[in-house]
Amino acid sequence: MGWSDGGGCWCPGPRLNEDNARFALLALLILCYLVVGAAVFSAVERPRELRAQQDWSRTLGTFSRSYNISRVQLAAFLRDYEKAQGAGIRAAHTPLRPRWDFTGAFYFVGTVLSTIGFGMTTPGTTAGRVFLIFYGLAGCAATILFFNLFLERIITLLAYVLRWFHERGLERSRALGSSAQRSSSLSEEVDSLDGWKPSVYYVMLILGMASVVISCCASAIYSPVEEWSYAESLYFCFVTFSTIGFGDLVSSQRDAYTNQTLYRAANFLLILVGVCCLYSLFNVSSIIVKQFLNWMLRKMECRGCRRRRKPWAPGNAVHPLGPKSRRNNISVETVCDSEAEGRPMSGEMISVKDFLASNKVSLAIMQKQLSETANRGPRQSYSRFSGFSGGVGALAIMNNRLVETSVDR
């Protein structure tokens, strides 16, 4: 069985659903990304691991012979020490703060709700583990909602700031123009400001710069206080702010610091702001990733059929791929401040007037609008019923699935 694109070209086989094709392509790219990452880390870290195993084997042999202790007794002692480490006991020269006093427990629940999960402190009792299940279930949901609300407001703020700069640019342009031009275009420019659309790429750039600045400032604090190198501090900031949370480096774990209360408060605020900014950056970047996937799908779609078609020229009445394909056939590097056919180009967001009205737009609608304007308008399926189409993020996906099931009925 085959399908026709409406331009006289017949392609064999059923056409894959756009959402399923995007999902399959993204899964394939992530798999390739995982393979590349595994190969790099294996090549970089495996020699160090082998050297450490050899050094540790020599150390155990030397210690066993020097103190006349059998390997079995020594292994049992080391297992007991590993259990003590799990309870927070360290044989370190620098004294560590208690893990389960109130401040230590507060730090722990902060890593739980933020989904960082360093792993340096874990509940060891059955009651504590059972409580953590219910506590984390409600707390993580509330924290994710907080991050989503933060994202709404930070994008709203950035849109207002970008619009302010756009207005200043228009005022400078009017000041340089002639009086006749100023009088004729003044009302048109004022009316067009409500439909002005800030660039998705500008928002992503600003969030990226903010994340870098916060990470660099935090590293300048962590490096002297925790006695880490600056590179280690930057590594800790990324691992923490991205909520990866390996736990090999953890801040604020010593028993005493200079200006201890001030440092721990600053540490909490830095982690909170850093996580919020990087979460927002990832969320906005996912729109660009979706654009890239759509661009790849368009490039891969029926290449043989396209080669047999007559090249389209601006004078032709109908685009050979159809009006919808012509509207979407645009690369990821499209200039952000252009418009075609009354729809925003791929680098633009929703207009300030529609997107920022009373600042009450939900994250699902916001991501749906950002994604649709980034891809030049809503998809046709289901939009005539509810106005929703495939968005970005869990909330948008959930709403889109609900709309599809209601339409099917």
Image (cartoon, rainbow, N blue to C red):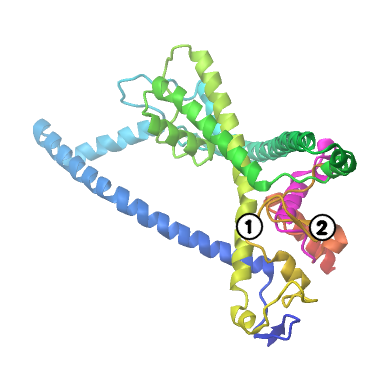
Say few, some or many: other residues with alpha carbon within 10 Å of mark 2 (under 14 / 14 to 19 / 20 or more). few
Q: Amino acid at mark 2?
A: Gly
Q: Is residue 106 visible?
A: no
Secondary structure mainly formed by the magenta segment = helix
**Residue visible at 74% across and 54% down in the picture:** 373
For the question of whether residue 356 can be seen, the reply is: yes
Q: Residues within 10 Å of mark 1 (few under 14, many from 20)?
A: many
In the displayed structure, does residue 218 sit left or right of residue 185? left
Q: What secondary structure is found at the residue carrying circle 2?
A: loop
Judge from the rendering whether residue 349 lies leftward or rightward of residue 272; answer left or right. right
Quarter holding the C terminus is bottom right
- 96 horizontally vs 303: left or right: left
Magenta residues span 353-380
Closer to us: 120 or 322: 322
The secondary element bearing badge 1 is classed as helix
Q: Where is residue 138, by image quadrant?
A: top right
Seen at 59% across and 30% down, the residue is 272
Q: Residue at x 80, y 44 (%)?
A: 355
- Where does residue 390 sit, x and y in percent of width and height? 73, 59
- CA gap, disc 1 and disc 2: 22 Å
Q: Mark 1 is on which residue type?
A: Lys
Residue labelled with disc 1:
290
Of all residues shown, which one is farthest toward the top?
A: 259
**Which residue lies under the disc numbered 2?**
342
